[in-house]
Image (cartoon, rainbow, N blue to C red):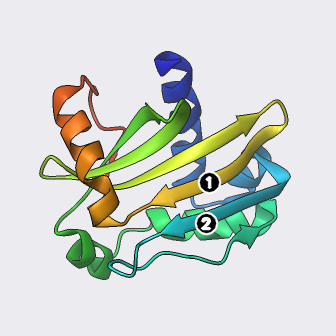
């Protein structure tokens, strides 16, 4: 699962950072959705984006570097391809602390949903697991 998760996440991130949403739309199902949980502590979209074009535009915005994003998470995140809850996941880490996890629900038609957890209270356990696990090198560093 880990190798397949890494491949899917790497392809997803390459499309998201390509600058062209068409690349990302190609990987998503037509009815894809994206939602997040910031727990009121960090900004997150609680109303789902629906449809491949809307999700692609949203994800594209997430990966664009911005000073305000770095301020919210406390630095420049290193982005890893991993697996979480049995699904391919994009994991953002700053100074060894997991600041966000985006799980990708993958179907035979493509990526059907992107669920992001950014609530720091809910990421404490993930940070503990991260510290104890082998996770390789970052796929991307958001400067």
Answer with left or right where residue 15 lies relative to residue 138: right
Residue 14 lies, in percent from the top left, at 53, 44
Nearest the viewer among 48 and 55 is 48
Q: Residue 35, labelled with which disc?
A: 2
Could you tell me which residue is drawn at 70 percent across and 36 percent down?
106
Which residue is the site of mark 1?
A: 114
Nearest the viewer among 9 and 115 is 115
The vertical placement of 122 against 130, above or below, is below
Could you tell me which residue is drawn at 26 percent across and 46 percent down?
125
C-alpha distance separating marks 2 and 1: 7 Å
Answer with left or right where residue 55 lies relative to residue 101: right
Answer with left or right where residue 43 lies relative to residue 133: right
Furthest residue toward left: 95
Please say whether residue 18 is visible from this viewpoint. Answer: no
Q: Earlier in the sequence, mark 2 or mark 1?
A: 2
Residue 33 lies, in percent from the top left, at 73, 60
Q: Few, some or many C-alpha atoms within 10 Å of disc 2 (few <14, some 14-19, many ≥20)? A: some
Q: For the residues labelled 2 and 1, say whether their Cβ atoms are less than 8 Å apart.
A: yes
């Amino acid at each position: 699962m880990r190798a397949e998760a890494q491949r899917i996440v790497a392809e997803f991130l390459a499309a998201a950072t390509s600058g062209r949403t068409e690349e990302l739309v190609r990987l998503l199902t037509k009815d894809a959705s994206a939602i997040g949980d910031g727990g009121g502590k960090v900004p997150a979209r609680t109303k789902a984006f629906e449809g491949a074009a809307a999700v692609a535009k949203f994800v594209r915005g997430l990966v664009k570097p911005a000073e305000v994003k770095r301020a919210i998470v406390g630095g420049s995140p290193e982005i890893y391809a991993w697996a979480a809850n049995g699904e391919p996941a994009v994991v953002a880490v700053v100074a060894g602390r997991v600041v966000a996890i985006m799980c990708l629900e993958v179907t035979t038609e493509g990526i059907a949903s992107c669920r992001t957890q950014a609530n720091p209270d809910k990421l404490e356990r993930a940070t503990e697991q991260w510290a104890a696990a082998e996770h390789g090198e970052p796929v991307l560093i958001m400067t």
